[in-house]
């Protein structure tokens, strides 16, 4: 596995989880990254070997030589790269070491750094369509859904404790979003829906988990609409999954395509019904009227109507949440991700040997 950013965010977490899933199925896995204290600590906790290496930067012409040397030393059968820089240099390293390369795209990226790999994998069909639309042959792109480890949903802080921390009452209606506070996530459309929601459910609280440049504007919008008392800006929270237990409905009101709505998958594992925008990446997690509801992107009235419907119907929330959990157990587990990765690796190795 090869990845180069210095942060520890979604793609980096996925590297840890993929490595765990493959290791648990009997494979030897080595993660190569540029020095990254948080990623290295997470890998050490998961007992996954890691090799920090000077491979950062798209002008780093020594990176493929260094990666090729590590691949040969490790005896790698596959190089699996994540994000653009790792995919660029990992692909050339594979050619030097005669090892096939699988390059993973985690968002709506340009094809440029990924096309040198033997196969491109994407986190969703929406991202696959985005890559194919750029002229990459469809047979060179496969989907590998993200899978989440079961321990992410174990030993969570009790609901009563979280309610006490936030000053919430038992039975008080709660909705929420777990997403970066940016324009594309569509928070402003949820805030615009709150006056209607509060008229129907006066005690309703909206929890916004995440930080971002839009926070000031969103706070001003809530104040202007007279709903600032209903909106809690909680910032970035390591315990976001635990806090989702408080939500009667988890919302993702994005106005742009998503790579894959991971927060919606987390909600499904918690048995929570979801409401999201009807756009690629979200429509692969939410099955309308089965696991949640889809609304047109940017339509605050439709968003309010969907939430009013769910908040007013406990039986519907229960049915959607139960179905969402069953679907997540089938499609979005660590074991399912590792098994699908194995299938993709076998396909690439067979083609490489031919």
Image (cartoon, rainbow, N blue to C red):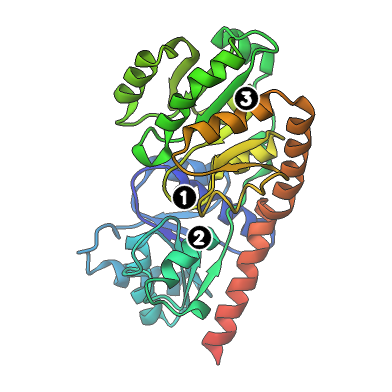
Secondary structure state at the residue bearing disc 2: helix
Q: CA distance from mark 1 to mark 3?
A: 22 Å
Instruction: Give x and y (percent) for residue 145.
Output: 59, 57
Asked whether 347 or 297 is in front, the reply is: 297
Helix, strand or loop at label 3? It is loop
- Residue 126's tag is 2
Question: Which residue is painted at 35% across and 38% down in the image?
Answer: 183
Circle 1 is placed at which residue position?
258
Q: Is residue 272 above or below residue 57?
A: above
Residue behind mark 3: 247
Q: In the image, what residue occupies the spot 70% across and 47% down? A: 328
- Dots 1 and 3: beta carbons under 8 Å? no
**Which residue is pictured at 41% across the width and 48% down the height?**
256
Tag 1 secondary structure: loop
The answer for how far apart the CA atoms under marks 2 and 3 are is: 27 Å
Name the outermost residue toward the bottom. 354
Front residue of this view, candidates 6 and 117: 117
Residue 28 lies in quadrant = bottom right
């Amino acid at each position: 596995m090869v990845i180069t950013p210095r942060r520890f965010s979604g793609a980096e977490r996925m590297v840890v989880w993929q490595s765990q899933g493959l290791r648990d199925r009997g494979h030897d896995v080595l993660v190569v990254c540029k020095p990254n204290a948080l990623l290295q600590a997470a890998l050490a906790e998961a007992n996954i070997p890691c090799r920090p290496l000077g491979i950062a930067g798209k002008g780093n012409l020594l990176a493929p030589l260094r990666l090729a040397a590590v691949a040969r030393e490790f005896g790698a059968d596959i190089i699996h790269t994540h994000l653009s820089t790792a995919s660029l240099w990992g692909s050339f390293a594979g050619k030097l070491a005669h090892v096939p390369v699988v390059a993973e795209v985690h968002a709506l990226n340009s094809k440029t750094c990924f096309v040198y790999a033997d196969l491109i994998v994407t986190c969703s069909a929406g991202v696959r369509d985005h890559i194919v639309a750029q002229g990459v042959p469809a047979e060179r792109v496969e989907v590998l859904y993200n899978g989440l480890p079961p321990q992410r949903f174990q030993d969570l802080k009790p609901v009563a404790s979280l309610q006490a921390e936030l000053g919430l009452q038992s039975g008080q209606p709660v909705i929420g979003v777990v997403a970066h506070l940016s324009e594309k996530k569509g928070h402003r459309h949820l805030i615009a829906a709150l006056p209607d929601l509060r008229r129907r459910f006066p005690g309703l609280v909206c929890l916004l988990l995440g930080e971002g440049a839009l926070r000031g504007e969103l706070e001003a919008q809530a104040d202007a609409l007279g709903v600032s008392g209903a909106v809690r800006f909680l910032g970035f929270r390591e315990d976001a999954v635990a806090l989702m237990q408080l939500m009667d409905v988890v919302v993702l009101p994005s106005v742009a395509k998503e790579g894959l709505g991971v927060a919606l998958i987390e909600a499904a594992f918690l048995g929570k019904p979801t409401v999201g925008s009807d756009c690629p990446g979200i429509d692969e997690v939410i099955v309308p009227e089965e696991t949640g509801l889809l609304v047109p992107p940017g339509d605050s009235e439709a968003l309010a109507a969907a939430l009013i419907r769910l908040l007013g119907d406990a039986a519907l929330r229960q049915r959607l949440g139960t179905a969402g959990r069953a679907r997540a157990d089938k499609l979005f587990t660590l074991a399912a991700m590792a098994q699908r990765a194995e299938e993709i690796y076998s396909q690439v190795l067979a083609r490489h040997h031919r």
